[in-house]
Image (spheres, rainbow, N blue to C red):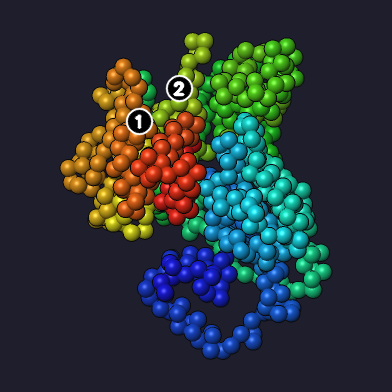
Amino acid sequence: MLLKELSSLASPLSAGQVDKLKQLTAELSAVQLAWVSGYLAATSEQGTAELPQAAGSSDAGAEQTISIVYGSQTGNGRGIASELAEKAQAQGYAVNLVSMGDYKTRQLKQESLLLLVVSTHGEGDAPDDAIELHKFLSSKRAPKLDNLNYSVLALGDSSYEFFCQTGKDFESRLNALGATAIAPLVECDVDYQEQAEQWQADVLEAVKPLIQTAGASVVSIASSHVTTSSYTKQKPYSAELLVSQKLTGRDSDRDVRHVEIELGESGLNYQAGDALGVWFTNSQDLIAELLRSLKLDANEAVTVGKEKLSLLEALTHKKELTQLYPGLVTGWADLSQDPKLLAISADKSLTREFVNNHQVADLVRLFPASVTAEQFVSLLRGITPRLYSIASSQAEVESEVHLTVALVEDERDGVARFGGASQFLASAEEGQTVQVYVEPNNHFRLPENPDTPVIMVGPGTGVAPFRAFMQERAAQGAEGKAWLFFGNPHFEQDFLYQTEWQQYLQSGELSRIDLAFSRDQEHKVYVQHKLAEQGEALWQWLESGAHFYICGDAERMAKDVHQALLDLVMKYGNKKPEQAEQYLEELRAAKRYQKDVY
């Protein structure tokens, strides 16, 4: 059996141990693998008498393992779960750290200690890796869990209506199935670090009497690192920006950039489908506008966390200035006592609408209030890095990483407003330092077999990962067919990477391309319309084993494409609506229907 095919069901190892074995061996050379093989063989001949054992049978020891499972869309949940695993192991506990996507649902009824970290995205949706477990717990197949002790940390964004909904769902279902909460559900907003650390401390304290009562000694297992890189969200790499080049034409109504970043000797590796996390600094023009409006001194000292720094430094490097959140609207309404803003803040739907259509500077301008520097800073959220789908393959660009970045730009009352990270990248100069890290996306991957056909739907900047896919497939010498659906407003102004797609078509590495330029004719044409036009051929591709990918806007595009896919499955597969939904669900479960939407 090949190691990549190994699972906990086909071996005496747990799912966590299988994952660790795969991670370790992936890093080793042939010589190192041979040495480890010999070492393990010699160790097994000596027997296991000298190895530490949990009291009682091996099964009893297994029951005392703390299972830490995470569902993570952007990596925050994975990061918190990994921190918790390290802290638990440091205290001597045996830990099984695993993604919900790799967690075997049949293992649930064997668990005695389960700690869950899960995010919510979209309209209360579970992250991709949590979908199966979420569905299982809500189904009739879910077992009674009277012997399970658990706790849930939920991650979310209070700007959205269904704040932390997935975590609430897990809490509700586990409770209904008879499990016992050892610590209350914790709902974390975007600024989650302090709450997460407190929850970690609380649950590790709560498990002590449970393990002691069972009379089992605990065996520490080796720490597992999710990534081999030393650069993370918390410790990013200082990379050099090489290029920020405009892709769209001079008459386009949008500014889309091709950005190239040099990773140098960092050792940072990424796969096609991964994202790059980018830390940014706020615009000095925006900060100057805020300071004028608030009549505050840039040099005044403020406190951010445990750090003392000037107001200018805090607004430049530490605080979010381009994205509002409900708590800031409510807090500002209390300070300003403006009747209109008080009415908005009292209505959740009006608050969400205001948050989605304004920035901090708009709030300050529209509803004046007298505040101190400390008050203002305390109301602001911390800056969070932005994730961009990587638009390159290291097989082609080696130590570089490429991004496709749309400048977020709007005008309100004659004042231009920009997105924080997109403006930072669009205005960055050659040689400028950019703080970055790689965020793996294991749920948006090319097929293992390069001969498998792929269908890629990526309008606008959603085309970015498919550029990486094509570079990777070209380097592999893939024989599998590839079909791209791309759309944007105008052919002449907005055909991103046009020359590259044409070259892939000429070489045969790209089999087909369907284009939807929505404003080049009287009626608007989008990618979902092109899917419908090619429905019969698409159905044949799917039936022949093709993998289907969507990248881009989650709010409308991804839903419209999903519906078009359902329609063609019903029409050409001769299926009823519920059968078509089941067909797509089976594709998703088989990793043949993958989304990278935002």
Quarter holding residue 431: top left
From the image, state whether disc 2 or disc 1 is nearer to you.
1
- Residue 12 at what x, y percent from top left? 56, 76
Instruction: Identify the residue at horizontal 67%, vertical 49% (top origin).
Output: 170
- Secondary element at image label 2: strand
Residue for badge 2: 409
Residue for badge 1: 529
Residue 240 makes an appearance in the image: no
Above or below — where is 349 with respect to 194? above
- Residue 383 at what x, y percent from top left? 58, 35
Residue 43 makes an appearance in the image: yes
Above or below — where is 123 with respect to 355? below
Relative to the observer, which residue lies in front, 432 or 572? Answer: 572
Mark 1 belongs to which amino acid? His
- Residue 229 at what x, y percent from top left? 48, 56
**Going by the picture, which residue comes out furthest to the bottom?**
46
Question: From mark 2 to mark 1, how far is it between C-alphas?
Answer: 28 Å
- Secondary element at image label 1: helix
Question: Which quadrant, please, contains the N terminus?
Answer: bottom left
Instruction: Identify the residue at horizontal 75%, vertical 52% (top origin).
Output: 175
Mark 2 belongs to which amino acid? Glu
Relative to the observer, which residue lies in front, 178 or 598? Answer: 178
The answer to whether residue 213 is left or right of residue 141 is right
